[in-house]
Image (cartoon, rainbow, N blue to C red):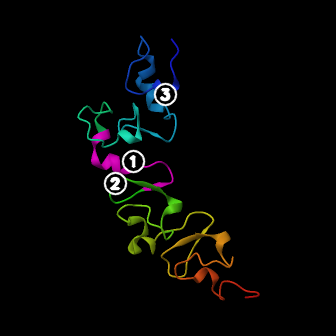
Amino acid sequence: MRIRKIQRCDGHFDCKDGSDEEETMCLAYECINDDYVKCKDGLQCVYRGFLCDGDVKSDCRDKSDEDEYFCRANKCKTFHISCNDDLTCVSVTSMCDGHNDCKDKTDENPDFCKDFKCPFMNVKCKDDMQCIHSNWLCNGKEECNDKSDEDSDVCEGND
């Protein structure tokens, strides 16, 4: 019997012989894409949106999809970070960029931003509170809230 890849290791026996949920195979199986995460026991892939959804009928056989700590660690896709409200995930490129992407504004929290390491091709503004793309330095427009991206100690040439 042929099944879709998404039906492999999803917790439902789609093949009559159960081979699509065979333990050894599922432990080695990579979830089909970044929208899915393996349950804690490693035997099943579930949609990230089902994590901590409050559904009484657990999506993971081991019930890890309703475990608070497991959800926090796996709620967001790769290169995304969970806001403190645990409801929203934002891209690391949206963290400390001067725009509130989290409803609770945690992505722009000064205590967080001062220690945040900017993503690849981004640089910190002088106040350590904001990251901007390196192409925006000395472009004649002030992207940093502290205007340091256009400072004379960073830029040289005609004003």
Q: Is residue 28 left or right of residue 42?
A: right
The disc placed on residue 120 is: none
* Residue 149 visible in the shown view: yes
Q: Nearer the viewer, residue 157 or 33?
A: 157
Could you tell me how far apart the alpha carbons at marks 1 and 3 are, in whole angstroms? Answer: 19 Å
Disc 1 residue type?
Lys
Kind of element beneath mark 1: loop
Circle nearer the N terminus (1, 2): 1
Q: Is residue 53 part of the magenta span, yes or no? A: no
Is 151 situated above or below 50? Answer: below
Tag 2 residue: 86
Quadrant in which residue 110 is drawn: bottom left
**34, 55: nearer the viewer:** 55
Give the Cα separation between the discs numbered 1 and 2. 8 Å
Graded by Cα atoms within 10 Å as few (under 14), some (14 to 19) or many (20 or more), the crowding at tag 3 reads few
Report the span colored magenta: 65-81
